Image (cartoon, grey):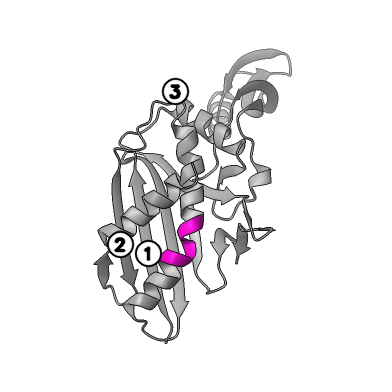
Amino acid sequence: MAITYQRTMKINYGRKLADLDFKKLCGELSKKDIFVCGNYDDYSDNAYGFTEVTKNKVTYVIHSNNEANIMSVSYGADAIAIVEGLGHIIDGLEYEKVSTETSKKEWATPEGSYIVFLGDKDGVNINLHNWGENGIEYDNGAIMQIRLQNGYEGLRLVFIINWEVETIQRKDKIEEAMVQAVMADMGKIQGIIEGRMNLKKFDIDTEDVEIDCHFDAKTESRSECTPDIIKQVRDARRGNE
């Protein structure tokens, strides 16, 4: 039976960004070919940065005999209830669905938290779609997903590496596949993202961070990443500055 090993590394930068600042951060990342989108999403379907945003607003206008507008409501169920409730009092009472489209410039909202990284690995795009999911697939079968989360736990950069094998693996083999094989890309991605975080307008401390790193298997066993592994990731980031 196949066994899936999973390594999770969460870097917490301490505080949740204001929603507007997070939109601006995602816009800055897009300038570096790093895009925040949904897990099954194509980044090209999303808007990034300060851009034209089109919104469609639907209202339900209630009128009498197609002439006098009495009121408007936001929900069709409310319009139906009003027409049915007052139709015996007001002659010719009916409602009409009205759509209004508006466009204006504003900071685009990211449509997810998964990172699409358009860097190159040996001359080819390393951000592959693995069965419809955004992740980087390696020759050894390991798949790394990256997320940028901004929630109640704070602003977090998360790396999740999954490695599916047929038999239980030795510790050195697990580290080779899930640490050494992905280390350079983790460092490069972390370096670029933290480089945007370090912009003065965001005021994010990328050095005083909380790091949670651990390994899991389907057997529910868990082992903590050694300090040396954590140090390797930080050193890999600095090597790309």
Is 96 on the left-hand or right-hand side of 155?
right
Kindly identify which numbered label has been placed on residue 7.
1
Q: Nearer the viewer, residue 120 or 48?
A: 120
Residue 221, position as x, y percentages in the image: 26, 73
Q: Quadrant of residue 100?
A: top right
> If the image is split into quadrants, where does the N terminus sit?
bottom left
Q: Decide if residue 117 is in sight here.
A: yes
Q: Are marks 2 and 3 in contact (CB under 8 Å)?
A: no
Q: Is residue 180 magenta?
A: yes
Residue density around tag 2, few if under 14, some if 14–19, many if 20 or more, within 10 Å: some
Viewer-nearest of discs 2 and 3: 3
The region drawn magenta spans 179-184
Label 3 vs label 1, nearer the camera:
3
Amino acid at the residue labelled 3 = Lys
How many angstroms separate mark 2 from mark 3 (CA)?
Answer: 32 Å
At which x and y percent is residue 123?
Answer: 69, 58
**Residue 214: which disc?**
2
Q: CA distance from mark 1 to mark 2?
A: 6 Å
- In the drawing, what numbered circle is on residue 200? 3
Q: Which residue shows up at 46% across the image and 51% down it? A: 187
Asked whether the beta carbons under mark 1 and mark 2 sit within 8 Å of each other, the answer is yes
Residue type (three-letter) at the residue carrying disc 1: Arg
* The one of 182 and 35 positioned closer to us in this rendering: 182
Q: Within 10 angstroms of label 3, few (less than 14), some, or many (20 or more) residues?
A: few
Question: Label 2 amino acid?
Answer: His
Is 86 included in the stretch rendered in magenta? Answer: no
Question: Residue 60 occupies which quadrant of the picture?
Answer: top right
Number of numbered discs overlaid on the protein picture:
3
Q: Earlier in the sequence, mark 2 or mark 3?
A: 3
Is residue 124 rendered to the left or right of residue 237? Answer: right
Which residue: 68% across, 22% down?
102
Camera sees residue 109: no
